[in-house]
Image (cartoon, grey):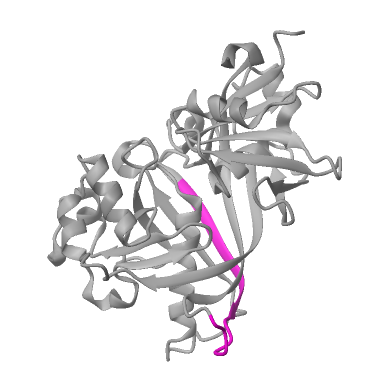
Amino acid sequence: MAARQILKVSARAFVSPVVGGSSGGSAAKSSGGGNPVTIFSPSPSTKLTPESRSRLAQTCTWESVVVDPCQEDSTVSRFSFFMPSGEEVSFCAHAAIGACSFIANKTSVISADGNLPMNSDDDEQEVVTFIAAQERYNKYNAFVRGKETELFMDIEHYESECDNNGSSLSLFLKEIGLNEDDINNDAKATTFLNSSVARPKTLIPVKSADRLHAATAPTNATKFQQMCESIDSTGLYLYDSSSTTNIECRQFPKSSGYAEDPATGIAAGALVASLHCRSMNSNDGGGDGNRVQSTTILQGTAMGRPSKIKVKIDDYIPTSSSTSDSSHRGTVKISYTGLVAFDHVSYLDESELS
């Protein structure tokens, strides 16, 4: 069994069923949608060093997650999230969704070599609890129902204006093939705004889905990274502001090793949190932080990788006016729901990483 020290599972989270397919049938699996994630599960006797974990991540084109048992509590898993560069990050929503679904469906996924139909007649719900390695003290719960996973989080929401340090919206729009005529002037409150529920994403409201999909990915990765760093952003998150419940979005990340992301959970959460915050402060009768808001985020359409993220805010507690951090907007009870497709299972030996 020495050659089977690390289980490697290729999966996709937030898969959107194709038009005409069932809500979770084989059509969804063959659509190629969703955000890829590689899940690594070391055997109990395999103790990976930080360097080995980073090298594992560098074998991947997209984000990855290493799943370990929590030493303090055997009923809890420990997730370590990585970018393809090998950099460990604090959290990655689609990787967490994929890992939770894998834990609940592990036996079936391995026996089917990942080729597991997405539709499931099993209505039983399994609860998966985990901690993020860089946080350690926050426990997260996910409900797994077949191939659908709902992840629950209590998070802090931050916002800050971006038009500083000489940076301007027009420069960013030019970099992605748009101009200021493409921006919805009625959504100025969320224009060129950094919103964060984990890492800051820059919100840009576009007038229509047509103009949203007319945007082009940045061609000069180094220049774009420098531009994002100048406004303390980890990427642009464009959204079709003409819709309020089924919102088409696109994300151009700062430096992830790829030009566009087919599904971005933390960006979707940040967008919905900011929209919810504006609704609370409006005069249209929506100013109730306890009002449940459910929004469907559609992403990856322009890439031919349709993805679907259901974001629900169960509660939003605004920050006290006495807080010392002016960027802190509130504490949010939020959940992400998405389908997961498993594509392939293989095994690695740790010696292959040296």
* 323 drawn magenta: yes
* 289 drawn magenta: no
Q: Which residue is drawn at 66% across and 18% down?
A: 112
Residue closer to the observer: 75 or 31? 75
Q: Which residue is drawn at 50% across and 55% down?
A: 266
**Percent position (x, y) of residue 346?**
61, 15
Above or below: residue 109 compared with residue 295: above
Q: What stretch of residues is rendered in magenta?
A: 308-324
Q: Residue at x 35, y 63 (%)?
A: 203
- Magenta stretch prevailing secondary structure: strand
**Percent position (x, y) of residue 35?**
47, 38
From the viewer's perspective, is 155 left or right of 139?
A: left
Above or below: residue 53 compared with residue 293: above
From the viewer's perspective, is 169 left or right of 126?
A: left
Residue 314: quarter of image: bottom right
- Quadrant in which the C terminus appears: top right
Q: Which residue is drawn at 53% across and 69% down?
A: 157
Residue 262: quarter of image: top left
- Answer whether residue 3 is visible to the viewer in this image: yes
